[in-house]
Amino acid sequence: MDFAAPREIIWLNGAPGSGKGVSTPLILKARGMTRSVCVSSLLSSAREARGYIDAGEMMPDHVVGDLLLEALLLPASTGHSATELNLVVDGFPRTAVQVDFVKLLMDKLRYLHTKYMDTPLAARFPRPTFKVVMLYVDEDTSINRQLQRAVAAQAHNKRVVDAGLGEQQLHEERSTDVLPEKARKRYQIFRQHYSAILRLKQFFPFHLIDACGSPADTQEQIRQELRYQSSLDLSEEAYSAIRHLPLAKDLQQTARQQLVSRLEGYCTHQRPLFGRVLSLLGEQVVPLLQQGALSGAAEWVSNEELFTKHPGCVDMMLDVLCDRGFQAHYVREVMPVPVRFDAASGQIQTKLQAMHRFKFSFDASGVRDANALKALEIAARITEAARNGTAGGAASAYADAMAGSSSGMRSQAAASPITESFIPEHLDLEAKMRAQDNSLRLKRVALAQQLQQQQQQQQQHACEGKCGSSCGGAAASDVDEEVYTIHRCLRPDVNCGHAQELEVVSASG
């Protein structure tokens, strides 16, 4: 089997004029890929495809599938790594049969991965992951962009010919981009098969991107949707192994709450030491921070006895600086310091002294923020207009300079994008793990209740044997707690033999 399969394939789809070609480089960068396949370019190289393309009609599915497989599965002899094989497929699938093709391809790659998992061929068949990106535009937007693309291609090619450059610099002029009827037909064909493409939501992560806005807006949406997510990119086994570790955002939220509590405690219970730390900050540290305000970095080295005798004062200083928005790092260094020199023997007597090194960093980008740059631009334009004309020219310059800000406000008032992600339930590992946790928790509670009922019954029978009558056992307030050991499985099947001991509190008389 002389071919190697990619680990990750992103199927990029969308209406004509939705910007698939422009978005491909961004997706490659966001996912760390280097390879892409454009199906339209792939088909244009086949002789039998030219007539279908010129007519704006769909190619037969079997022809498209054969050509695409040749492009996806590279010969193993090329020596490509698994990451180099990952790719973006632009313009596929587009029909119900092609949707089935994608599903069957995933099934086959999973089968090969399982079959060769523990063999020398395992590297050729990594665990496959598919993602679908759909760029949405309405019919009017699609037709206008197709026609604009034709005008831009004609203008570019005219400049290339006039400049005498080679044919490799020419852009493709599609016949369907010239006539509105053909452009509309292409969009209508896309809409006919759109519902079939939506079936992919059942099998793979599906990202619907609203591409009706500007290219910058579309690119930002793509960047957010395709960011790394461990619950989607990792296998279930790998994700389950690391899931118990906290997320950085959760640690930050908890740390902020703890910081507030510590600062309140310093001020309430350690006021004298806290006051000395604040004095050192104001007298020695703040001047250094002011000197490094433009660079965003400063360093303070001190042999202050306060930090040696009271190490908690280091935490006080770090907490105060953190609250003020600085990033502070502390290192305690112990070095020999000469205290006596014997002239006769030439010996130097030293003692070890602790040196406290604090490094501070903070964001200095605000020194030249957008508002300041805008003010400089406005001032420059007004000055230039005043030199060349009247005050009316200066007012016009001011209005032109402010146009960028007003256009930004108008864009914010536009309709919000309809971008949304759809994750199939069988691929949402976090939801699966939560469901398993809840199921195990409920079973533990039920088992604990069952044990408690058994103990109560045993206690009642023992009491009946002693008293000769049914006294109902001990009162609820007299029941003592006893710890029983039961077993639960670490795997989804709690009835199997892979068990872990678990303590359950039950009741005993």
Image (cartoon, rainbow, N blue to C red):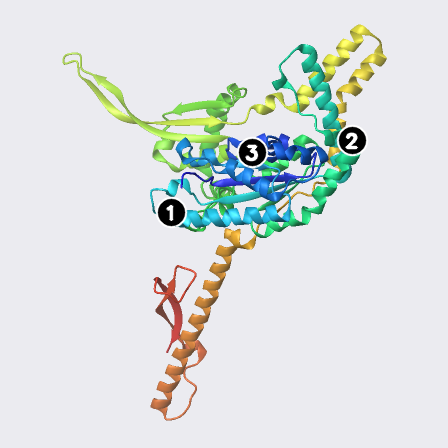
| Amino acid type for the residue under numbered disc 2 | Leu
Residue at the far front in the pictured view? 48
Query: Are dots 2 and 1 in contact, CB under 8 Å?
Result: no
Q: Give the mark, 1 or 3, whose residue is nearer the N terminus.
A: 3
The residue located at (17%, 16%) in the rendering is: 347
| Amino acid type for the residue under numbered disc 1 | Tyr
Apparent side of residue 202 relative to residue 335 in the rendered image (left or right): right
Apparent side of residue 225 relative to residue 4 in the rendered image (left or right): right
| Amino acid type for the residue under numbered disc 3 | Val
The residue located at (38%, 47%) in the rendering is: 116
Can you tell which of label 3 and label 2 is closer to the viewer?
Answer: 2
Instruction: Work out which quarter of the rendered image holds the C terminus and state it.
Output: bottom left
Apparent side of residue 69 relative to residue 351 in the rendered image (left or right): right
Coordinates of residue 274 in the picture (x, y in percent): 46, 36
Coordinates of residue 351 in the picture (x, y in percent): 25, 25
Instruction: Please tell me whether residue 251 is drawn above or below residue 484 in the rendered image.
Output: above
- The residue where tag 2 is placed is 179
Q: Give the mark, 3 or 2, whose residue is nearer the N terminus.
A: 3
- The residue where tag 1 is placed is 116
Q: Secondary structure at mark 3?
A: strand
Out of 325 and 86, give the one closest to the viewer: 86
Q: Which of the 4 image quadrants contains residue 126?
A: top left
Instruction: Please tell me whether residue 390 is drawn above or below residue 280 in the rendered image.
Output: above
| Residue 449: numbered disc | none
Residue 422 shows up from this direction: no
Q: Which of the 4 image quadrants contains residue 406?
A: top right
